[in-house]
Image: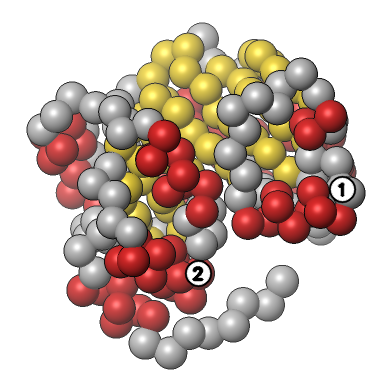
Amino acid sequence: MRLRNVKGSREHIAINEYVIKDAETYKGTWKDLFQDGKPIHIEIGMGKGKFLMEMARQHPEIHYIGIEKYSSVLVRALEKMEEDPLDNVHFIRMDAEYINQVFDKGEVEEIYLNFSDPWPKDRHAKRRLTSRQFLARYKNIIRENQSVIFKTDNRDLFDFSLEEVKEAGWKLDLCTFDLHHSEYLEGNVMTEYEEKFVKKGNPICKMIIHYE
């Protein structure tokens, strides 16, 4: 998908109060930064922020950090935050490949992956956010027995992800190939993409995994 460049997005991000600058300097000290003892959940590839902000409204006892590498996308989430500020939502502009440089072991309690880029070419498999390479990164930051939650409408990506979970030694706690016609729908918060796909009748796949 080609992303439209938003003029001035980098400059907007650089001065925005909701964006955490130099995030790598907080590795190992995130609780000291927030000083309230609330757990940290992150969404990788958070897009325009609909899911993240709705989760934050429902759970003020949790800090939510949205990670997005594209300035032109992140700036749209910032516009939403400026219209309806939330104290427990924060953003980092970065490539998720470097997430181990930002968070230390056990600093994150939950990770959300929503409608991630499928990177359909085989040679790009390691770039998929559910690849064994990324699962190894998550293992290095997530608290023991806490969850990675993944949703997608892309069945090929989901099937690939199920294999990677097994190969990487993670445990599968929940799996459905049609979330919106399953027993697991209660409490589901939709993303912008999810709303669009559901209207089209596309089945949504979901898994929850953890590493012991």
Q: Which mark is residue 164?
A: none
Q: Give the camera-side residue of 108 and 198.
A: 198
Name the kind of residue labelled 2 in the image.
Val
How far across and how far down the image is residue 61, in percent?
29, 28
Q: Residue furthest bottom?
A: 7
First of labels 1, 2 by sequence position: 2
Disc 1 + disc 2, Cβ < 8 Å: no
Residue to which mark 2 is pinned: 73
Residue 52: tell me if it is visible.
Answer: yes
> Which residue occupies 38% across, 40% down?
56
Q: Amino acid at mark 1?
A: Asn
Is residue 166 visible to the viewer in this orientation of the structure? no
Q: Is residue 121 left or right of residue 16?
A: right
Q: Which residue is mark 1?
A: 202
Camera-near label (1 vs 2) is 1
The residue that appears at 61% across and 50% down in the rendered structure is 191
Placement of the N terminus among the 4 image quadrants: bottom right
Q: Secondary structure at mark 2?
A: helix
Residue 40 image offset from top left, x and y in percent: 33, 32
Task: State the CA–CA distance, disc 1 to disc 2.
Answer: 24 Å
With 159 as the anchor, is 142 left or right in this view?
left
Query: Left of 71 or right of it: where is 28?
Result: left
